[in-house]
Amino acid sequence: MRIRFLVIAAMTAVTFGGAGKAVAAPAIAPVGPFGPLAELVVRRVLLGDFVAAAKYGTGQPIDDPVREQKILDTVTAESVRLGMPPEPSVRFFRAQIEASKVVQRGLFSRWERHPGQRPVRKPDLATEVRPRLDELTMELLRELHATLQLRRPNVVCGIWRVEAETSADIVHRLDKLHRRAVAVSMRPICQS
């Protein structure tokens, strides 16, 4: 049996027992109430590959302050519409943007070192990739709203390595670069 990475955001609350000792509460099941949020985060991180492929070799910079501000403005407006304070949502989406840059920079570096791994096809950023990112933004906002009452400062996150019986049991196979990006993406939830 081979060990693969199954990406989940396992959340456990830390409670305090007698004499102020920290006691770990039982872990919520890997999918748990944050499973859908973690799944969306991973999907957004994986779209970073397509963003990188669309930009690589075109001279388009990884940093796109105009596009980033547009996303954050949308997040602010939608958060208010959903009845959520916008600041945590904006902080969360800044992390999503940074995670995408982690992926893009990592892939650009990899492709410079290993030209044979460069993407064969360049997806169109405006018509193929950004609409998918925009759709995920709305899904992530809905999931942030759904988990609003569950997120607390005592939440601990992790990406768990699990043993899988078959390849069908693997939800996502992530390399070190993508695991790092997921960790960046989840940081605001884990620290909220």
Image (cartoon, rainbow, N blue to C red):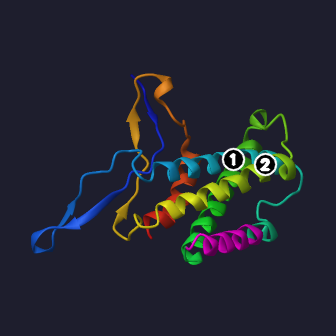
Is residue 56 among what the camera can see?
A: no
Name the one closer to the observer, 82 or 168: 82
65 left or right, relative to 91 = right
- Residue at 59% across, 57% down: 140
Is residue 34 among what the camera can see?
A: yes
Residue bounds of the magenta highlight: 69-83
- Based on the picture, tell me whether residue 77 belongs to the magenta stretch: yes
Residue 46 image point, x, y percent: 64, 45
Q: Amino acid at mark 1?
A: Leu
Mark 2, residue position: 129
> In what element is the residue under mark 2?
helix
Where is 153 relative to 30, above or below? below
| Tally of numbered tags | 2
Q: Which mark is residue 95?
A: none
Q: Amino acid at mark 2?
A: Val
Residue 117 image point, x, y percent: 74, 35
- Based on the picture, tell me whether residue 76 belongs to the magenta stretch: yes
174 left or right, relative to 17 = right
Q: Quadrant of residue 71?
A: bottom right
Name the one closer to the observer, 117 or 68: 68
The secondary structure making up most of the magenta span is: helix
Mark 1, residue position: 47
Q: Are marks 2 and 1 in contact (CB under 8 Å)?
A: yes
Whichever of callouts 2 and 1 sits on the residue coming sooner in the sequence is 1
Q: Quadrant of the N terminus?
A: top left
Residue 81 image point, x, y percent: 64, 72
